[in-house]
Image (tube, grey):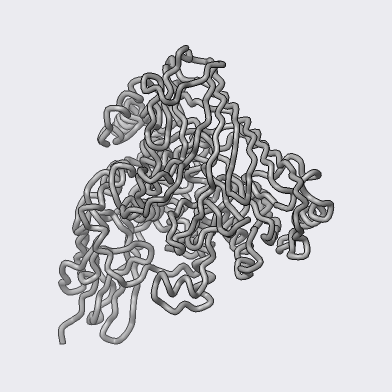
Amino acid sequence: MHKAGDSNRDLGTISGQPLRRNYLELIICLKEELISNSKHSIIKKLFLFLLLIMSCSPIFGQEKLYLPLEFKKAYENETRSKDGSVSAGYWQNKATYNIEAGIDVKNRLLKGSAVITYFNNSPDTLRSVTFHTYQDYLKPYSSRKRFDGSKIKAEDHQGMVIGHVIIAEDTVDLNNPQQVIYGGTNYSIRLSDPLPPSENLDLQIFWNYEIPVEGQLRGRAPFRSGAYDSTSMFVGYWYPEIAVRDDIHGWDTKAFDPATEFYHDFSDYKISLTLPEEFTVWASVPPDNPGKVYSGEVQNRLEKARESNTAVQILTQEDFRTGSGATKTWNYTAKEFPDFAFAFSDHYLWEAATYIDEKGDYLIQTAYSYANPGFGEILPTLATSLKIFHRDFPKYPFPYKFFTVFDGMEMGGMEFPGMANDGLFTKEIIRQLYRVDPSDEEVHFRNLTITLHEMAHMYFPFMMGINEKKYAWMDEGFALASAVFIEDWKPVNESNFNYLGSLNAVPPMVPSNEHDNSFINSIVGSAAYLALYELLGDKLFHNGLHAFMDEWKHKHPTPYDFMFTFNSASGRDLTWFWKAWLFEWGYMDLGIKAIEGHNVQVENSGGRPMTFKIVTTYENGKNIEERISPAVWENSSLYTHAIPGSQPIKEVRLEFSNYPDAVKENNVWRREE
């Protein structure tokens, strides 16, 4: 893979030869030939024949892909289109949230009330409504899977306690099984008055929950939000959220567990948060009432930060003070947001700066404990990430003009709209996790990688409204792939990746919530994005990606919408590629099958169409590297490559700079002495 900035390199080549022309290029060439020599009737007929094929089958090979019944129904009903575009029959529901909440910090108790207006934009009359209570995940009997399929120790926690629910002025009896079905982390309520199309209803909900103590190293449940000390907390998944109802699956009633994450509608929020006056709040958007919640000095510093590309100290230790017992209320408005999160502390430092380039200006911030000064290096990684997103991948404006990283999780990170809850990688943490003694450069690289990863999620799933519960490969794969564009990207190590070929490594199109070890599909998803990038080349890949983003931004695309859009935008039938990476059983493993003279035969044992390098060492000590496109695997699992030159060969090896390879033993051939 090229380094960041090498965007003009043509990666869609095979041993230096251009990839085959696509259908559109062929038609253009034939049209030009037809115009220049209209007497050639054979060319005329061929051109008209190709036009007929294109007009009758604009979706190329889409019909060859497996379509489950629920997807077939959507295409038959024309709520989806097989050319990847948003069809005239597409619909999408939404909600508005008017939330008031207060926090008893000492007892970590959040109490809230909400008036939620739900809009039925579908053609269906709704006889029920479903909302999520994600904090119920903490109840002892809840599903507690990790990404790797292991279980998390149960907590003694009540989850989200619903006081009462009022719909259309009628109080719902939550204990009545004829009216309410409780599904672990969601409630489905039968409506006494069904909701017709183009109408809306109001739900009034009162709830409370105890903010959990979070931290894997402390032996607690890794819920990606919670209390990190007695007065510093990141608050996510904190309000009853109306479930997505879409044209494919209906209501999303899948109970939450950490292995499957989320699926959000795009909603409008008006939120009021009341906390003791000595606390600072950071949220998905800036407050509507800065003059009431910030001091004049803090406001002045923020103005300086909006004009500075280096860190400005917004809060220092000298600004901390003891509370008087009074409170203040923070007001927020967010439009077309998939979710809303916030964090608070009475002793966190706050730094901010502005990043500006041709795609826009962004206020970037970090909030971290004064006891963790190393977190100060995180702010520059936000600017670096934005530079990579805009220059190299996905070359699309970052969706959130206001972004904050909070010093919370002890390792790893978690994305929220406009925010990330990140842990700082230190030498001690890296030693504990990976049993290596890292250099300063490696520590910085890991911190940059986690920042870039969480920020990449602002595109997928947040901007694109992807169902993470079912298609984790789409967003996690996208985020993992983005790291390849970091300068001096470090290739994967030489460890075996046999687990990629295990029975648990199911095809990515198997819904993530239906199997354990869903993190494997994140790795496979990342490799699929990178293989597609190298198959199409930088320009054509980004043309397809931008077509998908432009068309499906703030909607709910499925993998089929993604694939069909790329087929249309590239003008190529990529069915073989989608099948091999997403639908079929297989894994990533190439090996040297034989060498005859200067011809090396490479076998694709695992079936995934990978990019690879052939590195040849001659007897005279000279080395040559050749990068091979995934296109060589379109029609065969064997590829024969002619090694250039006539010098005797000493060694041939396969390298995979951006892909894990399941079996490394078959990657090297050496001449016997």
At a point 54% along the width and 48% down the height, the residue shown is: 211
Name the spot of residue 578 as percent of width and height, x first: 31, 44
Name the spot of residue 11 as percent of width and height, x first: 41, 58
Q: Is residue 543 left or right of residue 70?
A: right
**Residue 463 seen from this side:** yes
Viewer-nearest residue: 414 or 554: 414
Q: Is residue 12 left or right of residue 444?
A: left
Q: Picture quarter containing residue 601?
A: bottom left
At a point 37% along the width and 54% down the height, the residue shown is: 153
Q: Is residue 429 left or right of residue 53?
A: right
In the image, residue 666 sits, relative to residue 188, either above or below, namely below
At a point 36% along the width and 36% down the height, the residue shown is: 560
List the single residue furthest toward the right: 296
At a point 60% along the width and 36% down the height, the residue shown is: 112
**Residue 388 seen from this side:** no
Tell how many labels.
0
In the image, residue 298 sits, relative to residue 196, either above or below, namely below
Name the spot of residue 56 as percent of width and height, x first: 32, 25
Q: Is residue 41 left or right of residue 358?
A: left
Quadrant position of the C terminus in the picture: bottom left
Quadrant position of the N terminus in the picture: bottom left
Viewer-nearest residue: 580 or 222: 222
Viewer-nearest residue: 589 or 44: 589
Name the spot of residue 481 as percent of width and height, x first: 43, 56
